[in-house]
Amino acid sequence: MTQDTTLTEPKIEEKTLHPEQARTEFKERLKATIAARAEKWESFRAAQAEKLSAARTELTEKIETAKAERAEKKEAAKADALQVSLRGRTARKVVEVANHLPVLGHMSQNGELQARRNEREKEWKCPEGYTLIHVDPECFTMELLRPAEHTEETGERYVILQLHGGGYYNRIHNTYRDAAVWYSESGGGMDVLSIDYRTAPEDPYPAALQDALEAYQWLLEQGYLPKHIVVAGDSAGGGLSLALTLYLKDHQFPLPGGIVTMSAWTDLTKSGDSYRDNFDKDPIFGGSRDTLVYKEGYYAEHDPADPYISPIYGDYNGFPPMLMQVGEREMLLDDTLEVAAKAKEAGVLVRKHVYPGMFHIFQMGFHLFPEAEEAWSEVEQFLHIVRNQETGTAANTKKEE
Protein backbone atom coordinates (compact mmCIF):
# COMPACT_ATOMS: atom_id res chain seq x y z
CA MET A 1 0.00 0.00 0.00
CA THR A 2 1.49 3.38 -1.10
CA GLN A 3 1.59 6.19 1.53
CA ASP A 4 0.22 9.57 0.39
CA THR A 5 2.92 12.17 1.13
CA THR A 6 1.15 15.14 -0.45
CA LEU A 7 1.38 18.26 1.77
CA THR A 8 -1.87 19.92 2.54
CA GLU A 9 -2.10 23.68 3.21
CA PRO A 10 -3.30 24.62 6.68
CA LYS A 11 -6.71 25.95 6.82
CA ILE A 12 -7.01 29.63 7.72
CA GLU A 13 -9.91 30.46 9.77
CA GLU A 14 -11.55 33.51 8.41
CA LYS A 15 -12.78 35.98 10.95
CA THR A 16 -15.72 37.96 9.97
CA LEU A 17 -16.11 41.26 11.83
CA HIS A 18 -19.34 43.02 12.33
CA PRO A 19 -19.33 46.30 10.41
CA GLU A 20 -19.72 48.31 13.60
CA GLN A 21 -16.82 46.52 15.26
CA ALA A 22 -14.65 47.06 12.18
CA ARG A 23 -15.39 50.77 12.24
CA THR A 24 -14.51 50.92 15.92
CA GLU A 25 -11.17 49.18 15.42
CA PHE A 26 -10.36 51.41 12.45
CA LYS A 27 -11.09 54.50 14.51
CA GLU A 28 -8.86 53.24 17.32
CA ARG A 29 -6.02 52.52 14.93
CA LEU A 30 -6.49 55.93 13.33
CA LYS A 31 -6.45 57.59 16.74
CA ALA A 32 -3.27 55.73 17.71
CA THR A 33 -1.62 56.71 14.43
CA ILE A 34 -2.64 60.35 14.87
CA ALA A 35 -1.44 60.37 18.46
CA ALA A 36 1.93 58.82 17.50
CA ARG A 37 2.37 61.33 14.70
CA ALA A 38 1.40 64.17 17.02
CA GLU A 39 3.92 62.95 19.58
CA LYS A 40 6.63 62.77 16.93
CA TRP A 41 5.70 66.24 15.70
CA GLU A 42 5.86 67.68 19.21
CA SER A 43 9.19 65.96 19.76
CA PHE A 44 10.46 67.36 16.46
CA ARG A 45 9.19 70.86 17.32
CA ALA A 46 10.82 70.68 20.75
CA ALA A 47 14.11 69.57 19.23
CA GLN A 48 13.97 72.33 16.62
CA ALA A 49 13.08 74.89 19.26
CA GLU A 50 16.04 73.70 21.35
CA LYS A 51 18.35 73.92 18.34
CA LEU A 52 17.04 77.37 17.47
CA SER A 53 17.52 78.52 21.04
CA ALA A 54 21.06 77.14 21.08
CA ALA A 55 21.76 78.80 17.73
CA ARG A 56 20.38 82.11 19.02
CA THR A 57 22.49 81.80 22.17
CA GLU A 58 25.58 80.95 20.14
CA LEU A 59 24.92 83.86 17.77
CA THR A 60 24.40 86.21 20.71
CA GLU A 61 27.65 85.02 22.27
CA LYS A 62 29.49 85.51 18.98
CA ILE A 63 28.06 88.99 18.60
CA GLU A 64 29.03 89.87 22.16
CA THR A 65 32.49 88.36 21.65
CA ALA A 66 32.90 90.32 18.42
CA LYS A 67 31.80 93.50 20.19
CA ALA A 68 34.25 92.81 23.01
CA GLU A 69 37.04 92.12 20.52
CA ARG A 70 36.26 95.31 18.62
CA ALA A 71 36.21 97.26 21.87
CA GLU A 72 39.47 95.61 22.93
CA LYS A 73 41.08 96.40 19.58
CA LYS A 74 39.81 99.96 19.82
CA GLU A 75 41.28 100.34 23.29
CA ALA A 76 44.50 98.67 22.14
CA ALA A 77 44.67 101.07 19.20
CA LYS A 78 44.18 104.00 21.57
CA ALA A 79 46.87 102.67 23.89
CA ASP A 80 49.11 101.99 20.90
CA ALA A 81 48.61 105.55 19.70
CA LEU A 82 49.52 106.85 23.15
CA GLN A 83 52.53 104.55 23.68
CA VAL A 84 53.94 104.27 20.16
CA SER A 85 55.01 107.21 18.06
CA LEU A 86 53.47 107.87 14.67
CA ARG A 87 56.79 107.15 12.97
CA GLY A 88 57.11 103.98 15.05
CA ARG A 89 53.66 102.78 13.95
CA THR A 90 54.48 103.66 10.36
CA ALA A 91 57.75 101.74 10.51
CA ARG A 92 55.94 98.73 11.98
CA LYS A 93 53.34 98.81 9.21
CA VAL A 94 55.99 99.11 6.51
CA VAL A 95 57.84 96.14 7.99
CA GLU A 96 54.63 94.11 8.19
CA VAL A 97 53.66 94.82 4.58
CA ALA A 98 57.18 94.12 3.30
CA ASN A 99 57.28 90.75 5.05
CA HIS A 100 53.87 89.63 3.80
CA LEU A 101 54.04 90.55 0.13
CA PRO A 102 53.36 87.75 -2.35
CA VAL A 103 56.59 85.82 -3.02
CA LEU A 104 58.94 88.53 -1.73
CA GLY A 105 57.36 88.47 1.72
CA HIS A 106 57.94 84.76 2.01
CA MET A 107 61.54 85.18 0.83
CA SER A 108 62.05 87.90 3.43
CA GLN A 109 60.65 85.81 6.28
CA ASN A 110 62.84 82.80 5.55
CA GLY A 111 66.02 84.84 5.04
CA GLU A 112 66.42 84.16 1.32
CA LEU A 113 65.84 87.79 0.31
CA GLN A 114 68.51 89.11 2.67
CA ALA A 115 70.96 86.51 1.40
CA ARG A 116 70.37 87.73 -2.18
CA ARG A 117 70.77 91.34 -1.08
CA ASN A 118 74.08 90.49 0.53
CA GLU A 119 75.37 89.19 -2.81
CA ARG A 120 74.66 92.53 -4.52
CA GLU A 121 75.47 94.80 -1.60
CA LYS A 122 77.62 97.84 -2.30
CA GLU A 123 80.95 98.18 -0.60
CA TRP A 124 80.52 99.87 2.78
CA LYS A 125 82.29 103.18 3.17
CA CYS A 126 83.95 103.70 6.54
CA PRO A 127 82.79 107.07 7.92
CA GLU A 128 85.21 109.89 8.45
CA GLY A 129 86.96 109.72 11.80
CA TYR A 130 87.13 105.92 11.86
CA THR A 131 89.45 103.23 10.57
CA LEU A 132 88.33 99.73 9.59
CA ILE A 133 90.81 96.91 10.05
CA HIS A 134 90.11 93.54 8.40
CA VAL A 135 91.20 90.46 10.32
CA ASP A 136 91.14 87.03 8.69
CA PRO A 137 91.24 83.99 10.98
CA GLU A 138 91.26 80.60 9.31
CA CYS A 139 87.51 79.93 9.10
CA PHE A 140 85.83 83.36 9.14
CA THR A 141 86.48 87.09 8.90
CA MET A 142 86.37 89.97 11.37
CA GLU A 143 86.26 93.75 11.08
CA LEU A 144 87.67 96.00 13.80
CA LEU A 145 86.20 99.51 13.73
CA ARG A 146 88.01 102.07 15.86
CA PRO A 147 88.19 105.86 16.09
CA ALA A 148 91.02 107.18 13.93
CA GLU A 149 92.34 109.31 16.76
CA HIS A 150 92.84 107.45 20.00
CA THR A 151 95.58 107.89 22.55
CA GLU A 152 94.94 105.02 24.95
CA GLU A 153 96.88 101.81 24.91
CA THR A 154 94.86 98.73 23.92
CA GLY A 155 94.74 97.58 27.55
CA GLU A 156 93.02 100.83 28.48
CA ARG A 157 90.49 100.80 25.64
CA TYR A 158 86.98 99.37 25.71
CA VAL A 159 85.66 97.21 22.90
CA ILE A 160 82.33 95.76 21.81
CA LEU A 161 82.24 92.29 20.30
CA GLN A 162 79.27 92.50 17.93
CA LEU A 163 77.56 89.24 16.95
CA HIS A 164 75.10 89.84 14.12
CA GLY A 165 71.63 88.36 13.71
CA GLY A 166 70.11 86.43 10.82
CA GLY A 167 68.74 83.22 12.31
CA TYR A 168 72.19 81.55 12.10
CA TYR A 169 71.65 81.48 8.32
CA ASN A 170 72.54 84.98 7.10
CA ARG A 171 76.00 86.53 7.07
CA ILE A 172 77.02 90.01 8.16
CA HIS A 173 75.86 92.93 5.99
CA ASN A 174 76.12 96.70 5.90
CA THR A 175 73.37 97.30 8.45
CA TYR A 176 75.67 95.76 11.05
CA ARG A 177 78.57 97.91 9.90
CA ASP A 178 76.31 100.90 10.51
CA ALA A 179 75.40 99.40 13.88
CA ALA A 180 79.10 99.16 14.71
CA VAL A 181 79.36 102.94 14.31
CA TRP A 182 76.32 103.44 16.54
CA TYR A 183 77.81 101.13 19.16
CA SER A 184 81.10 103.01 19.03
CA GLU A 185 79.47 106.41 19.37
CA SER A 186 77.14 105.15 22.11
CA GLY A 187 80.18 103.88 24.00
CA GLY A 188 82.00 107.18 23.79
CA GLY A 189 84.43 106.05 21.12
CA MET A 190 84.70 102.35 21.91
CA ASP A 191 86.29 99.95 19.44
CA VAL A 192 83.90 97.49 17.81
CA LEU A 193 84.86 94.04 16.54
CA SER A 194 82.18 92.63 14.22
CA ILE A 195 82.60 89.03 13.17
CA ASP A 196 81.20 87.29 10.12
CA TYR A 197 80.81 83.90 11.78
CA ARG A 198 80.02 80.73 9.86
CA THR A 199 76.34 79.93 9.37
CA ALA A 200 73.98 77.09 8.53
CA PRO A 201 73.26 75.03 6.59
CA GLU A 202 76.87 74.64 5.42
CA ASP A 203 78.29 75.20 8.91
CA PRO A 204 75.78 74.31 11.64
CA TYR A 205 76.34 74.33 15.39
CA PRO A 206 78.90 74.59 16.95
CA ALA A 207 80.61 76.62 14.18
CA ALA A 208 79.11 79.99 15.17
CA LEU A 209 79.98 79.46 18.84
CA GLN A 210 83.53 78.38 17.95
CA ASP A 211 84.02 81.52 15.86
CA ALA A 212 82.63 83.77 18.61
CA LEU A 213 84.98 82.14 21.11
CA GLU A 214 87.95 82.60 18.78
CA ALA A 215 87.05 86.28 18.33
CA TYR A 216 86.85 86.75 22.10
CA GLN A 217 90.23 85.08 22.57
CA TRP A 218 91.68 87.27 19.82
CA LEU A 219 90.60 90.38 21.73
CA LEU A 220 92.33 89.08 24.86
CA GLU A 221 95.47 88.37 22.84
CA GLN A 222 95.44 91.95 21.53
CA GLY A 223 95.58 93.19 25.11
CA TYR A 224 91.95 94.13 25.78
CA LEU A 225 91.01 93.45 29.39
CA PRO A 226 88.01 91.13 29.87
CA LYS A 227 86.19 93.74 31.98
CA HIS A 228 86.60 96.18 29.07
CA ILE A 229 84.81 93.86 26.62
CA VAL A 230 81.05 94.11 26.05
CA VAL A 231 79.45 91.31 24.03
CA ALA A 232 76.49 92.59 22.02
CA GLY A 233 74.14 90.90 19.60
CA ASP A 234 70.68 91.05 18.06
CA SER A 235 68.30 88.19 17.31
CA ALA A 236 70.42 85.05 16.79
CA GLY A 237 73.45 87.16 17.65
CA GLY A 238 71.81 88.00 20.98
CA GLY A 239 71.39 84.32 21.74
CA LEU A 240 74.95 83.67 20.62
CA SER A 241 76.19 86.43 22.96
CA LEU A 242 74.60 84.62 25.89
CA ALA A 243 75.76 81.19 24.68
CA LEU A 244 79.32 82.48 24.38
CA THR A 245 79.26 83.86 27.92
CA LEU A 246 77.82 80.59 29.24
CA TYR A 247 80.67 78.74 27.53
CA LEU A 248 83.27 81.15 28.93
CA LYS A 249 81.88 80.69 32.44
CA ASP A 250 81.68 76.90 32.16
CA HIS A 251 85.28 76.67 30.92
CA GLN A 252 86.83 79.12 33.40
CA PHE A 253 87.54 81.91 30.90
CA PRO A 254 87.47 85.47 32.21
CA LEU A 255 84.01 86.94 31.60
CA PRO A 256 83.27 90.16 29.70
CA GLY A 257 82.30 93.34 31.48
CA GLY A 258 78.75 93.42 30.11
CA ILE A 259 76.23 92.02 27.62
CA VAL A 260 73.74 93.82 25.36
CA THR A 261 70.98 91.88 23.61
CA MET A 262 68.37 93.16 21.18
CA SER A 263 65.44 90.85 20.47
CA ALA A 264 67.59 87.90 21.49
CA TRP A 265 66.69 84.45 20.15
CA THR A 266 67.37 82.32 23.21
CA ASP A 267 64.90 79.45 22.82
CA LEU A 268 65.21 77.39 19.66
CA THR A 269 62.74 74.90 21.15
CA LYS A 270 60.14 77.67 20.84
CA SER A 271 58.51 76.81 24.17
CA GLY A 272 57.43 80.32 25.15
CA ASP A 273 53.79 81.40 25.08
CA SER A 274 54.70 84.39 22.91
CA TYR A 275 55.38 82.05 19.98
CA ARG A 276 51.64 81.40 19.98
CA ASP A 277 50.24 84.60 21.53
CA ASN A 278 52.13 86.86 19.11
CA PHE A 279 51.95 84.56 16.10
CA ASP A 280 49.46 86.86 14.36
CA LYS A 281 50.92 90.07 15.82
CA ASP A 282 54.58 89.77 14.88
CA PRO A 283 55.06 91.97 11.78
CA ILE A 284 58.13 90.04 10.63
CA PHE A 285 57.73 86.36 11.51
CA GLY A 286 53.99 86.24 12.19
CA GLY A 287 51.43 84.23 10.28
CA SER A 288 53.79 81.61 8.85
CA ARG A 289 55.85 78.64 9.99
CA ASP A 290 58.10 78.80 6.96
CA THR A 291 60.41 81.42 8.49
CA LEU A 292 63.90 81.62 9.97
CA VAL A 293 62.37 80.96 13.40
CA TYR A 294 61.27 77.47 12.35
CA LYS A 295 64.37 76.40 10.43
CA GLU A 296 66.20 73.56 12.15
CA GLY A 297 69.41 73.44 10.12
CA TYR A 298 71.49 75.29 12.70
CA TYR A 299 71.32 72.66 15.43
CA ALA A 300 71.06 69.77 12.93
CA GLU A 301 71.55 66.55 14.93
CA HIS A 302 72.03 68.35 18.26
CA ASP A 303 69.46 68.84 21.01
CA PRO A 304 67.94 72.34 20.62
CA ALA A 305 67.56 72.45 24.42
CA ASP A 306 71.35 72.49 24.80
CA PRO A 307 72.13 75.78 26.64
CA TYR A 308 74.84 76.60 24.09
CA ILE A 309 72.10 76.46 21.42
CA SER A 310 69.16 77.74 23.50
CA PRO A 311 70.70 79.79 26.33
CA ILE A 312 67.28 80.13 27.94
CA TYR A 313 68.19 76.81 29.59
CA GLY A 314 71.53 78.08 30.93
CA ASP A 315 72.77 78.87 34.43
CA TYR A 316 73.27 82.61 34.91
CA ASN A 317 75.02 82.65 38.24
CA GLY A 318 78.07 84.91 38.08
CA PHE A 319 77.06 86.65 34.83
CA PRO A 320 78.12 90.24 34.16
CA PRO A 321 75.54 93.08 33.97
CA MET A 322 73.12 92.78 31.09
CA LEU A 323 70.92 95.10 29.04
CA MET A 324 68.10 93.23 27.32
CA GLN A 325 65.73 94.96 24.90
CA VAL A 326 62.76 93.43 23.11
CA GLY A 327 59.64 94.51 21.22
CA GLU A 328 56.20 93.86 22.70
CA ARG A 329 54.84 92.29 19.49
CA GLU A 330 57.62 89.79 18.93
CA MET A 331 57.13 86.06 18.82
CA LEU A 332 60.51 86.01 20.58
CA LEU A 333 59.26 88.16 23.46
CA ASP A 334 59.43 85.36 26.04
CA ASP A 335 62.98 84.54 24.95
CA THR A 336 64.07 87.78 26.60
CA LEU A 337 61.61 87.75 29.49
CA GLU A 338 62.55 84.28 30.66
CA VAL A 339 66.31 84.84 30.49
CA ALA A 340 66.01 88.19 32.26
CA ALA A 341 63.94 86.56 35.02
CA LYS A 342 66.42 83.69 35.42
CA ALA A 343 69.38 86.04 35.48
CA LYS A 344 67.76 88.35 38.00
CA GLU A 345 66.90 85.37 40.22
CA ALA A 346 70.57 84.36 40.03
CA GLY A 347 71.58 87.80 41.31
CA VAL A 348 72.69 89.24 37.98
CA LEU A 349 72.31 92.97 37.40
CA VAL A 350 69.76 93.13 34.60
CA ARG A 351 68.18 96.03 32.83
CA LYS A 352 65.22 94.78 30.80
CA HIS A 353 63.07 96.93 28.56
CA VAL A 354 59.98 95.76 26.67
CA TYR A 355 59.23 98.43 24.07
CA PRO A 356 55.45 98.84 23.57
CA GLY A 357 54.20 98.06 20.08
CA MET A 358 57.67 97.35 18.73
CA PHE A 359 58.82 94.57 16.44
CA HIS A 360 61.87 92.34 15.99
CA ILE A 361 65.20 94.25 16.00
CA PHE A 362 63.43 97.58 15.66
CA GLN A 363 66.68 99.12 16.93
CA MET A 364 68.08 98.81 13.41
CA GLY A 365 65.82 101.74 12.49
CA PHE A 366 68.52 103.84 14.19
CA HIS A 367 67.30 107.47 13.95
CA LEU A 368 64.22 106.81 11.78
CA PHE A 369 61.73 106.74 14.68
CA PRO A 370 61.83 107.67 18.39
CA GLU A 371 61.67 104.15 19.80
CA ALA A 372 64.85 103.14 17.96
CA GLU A 373 66.57 106.32 19.13
CA GLU A 374 65.47 105.64 22.69
CA ALA A 375 66.86 102.10 22.50
CA TRP A 376 70.26 103.38 21.42
CA SER A 377 70.14 106.04 24.13
CA GLU A 378 69.58 103.20 26.59
CA VAL A 379 72.57 101.35 25.13
CA GLU A 380 74.63 104.49 25.64
CA GLN A 381 73.58 104.69 29.30
CA PHE A 382 74.42 101.04 29.85
CA LEU A 383 77.83 101.31 28.21
CA HIS A 384 78.52 104.38 30.35
CA ILE A 385 77.74 102.28 33.42
CA VAL A 386 80.09 99.52 32.25
CA ARG A 387 82.86 101.95 31.44
CA ASN A 388 82.57 103.65 34.77
CA GLN A 389 81.98 100.41 36.65
CA GLU A 390 78.86 101.92 38.21
CA THR A 391 77.07 98.59 38.42
CA GLY A 392 74.98 99.34 41.46
CA THR A 393 71.32 100.30 41.48
CA ALA A 394 71.49 101.95 38.06
CA ALA A 395 72.35 98.70 36.31
CA ASN A 396 69.75 96.81 38.30
CA THR A 397 66.92 98.99 37.11
CA LYS A 398 64.15 96.84 35.70
CA LYS A 399 62.39 98.86 33.06
CA GLU A 400 59.12 97.51 31.69
CA GLU A 401 56.99 99.93 29.73
Image (spheres, rainbow, N blue to C red):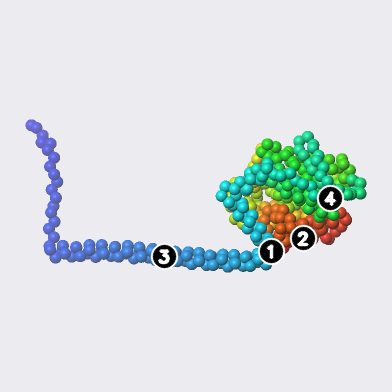
Q: Which of the numbered marks, if any, corresponds to residue 398?
A: 2
Instruction: Say which label, 3 or 1, has the lower sequence index.
Output: 3
Residue 208 visible, this angle? yes
Numbered mark located on residue 129 in the image: 4
Mark nearer the N terminus (2 vs 3): 3
Q: Residue at x 32, y 62 (%)?
A: 40
Amino acid at the residue labelled 4: Gly
Q: Percent from the top left, x then y, of residue 178?
A: 76, 50
**Left or right of residue 58, residue 232 in this image:** right
Q: Which residue carries the number 3 mark?
A: 52
Query: In this rendering, which labeled residue sits more in front, label 4 or label 2?
Result: 4
The residue type indicated by label 3 comes to Leu
In the image, which is nearer the foreground, mark 3 or mark 1?
1
For the residue labelled by badge 3, is the local secondary structure a helix, a strand or a loop? helix
Q: Quadrant of residue 136?
A: top right
The residue carrying mark 1 is: 85
Q: Earlier in the sequence, mark 4 or mark 3?
A: 3
Labels 1 & 4 near each other (Cβ < 8 A): no
Give the left or right position of residue 295, taking residue 232 as reference.
left
Q: Secondary structure at mark 4?
A: loop
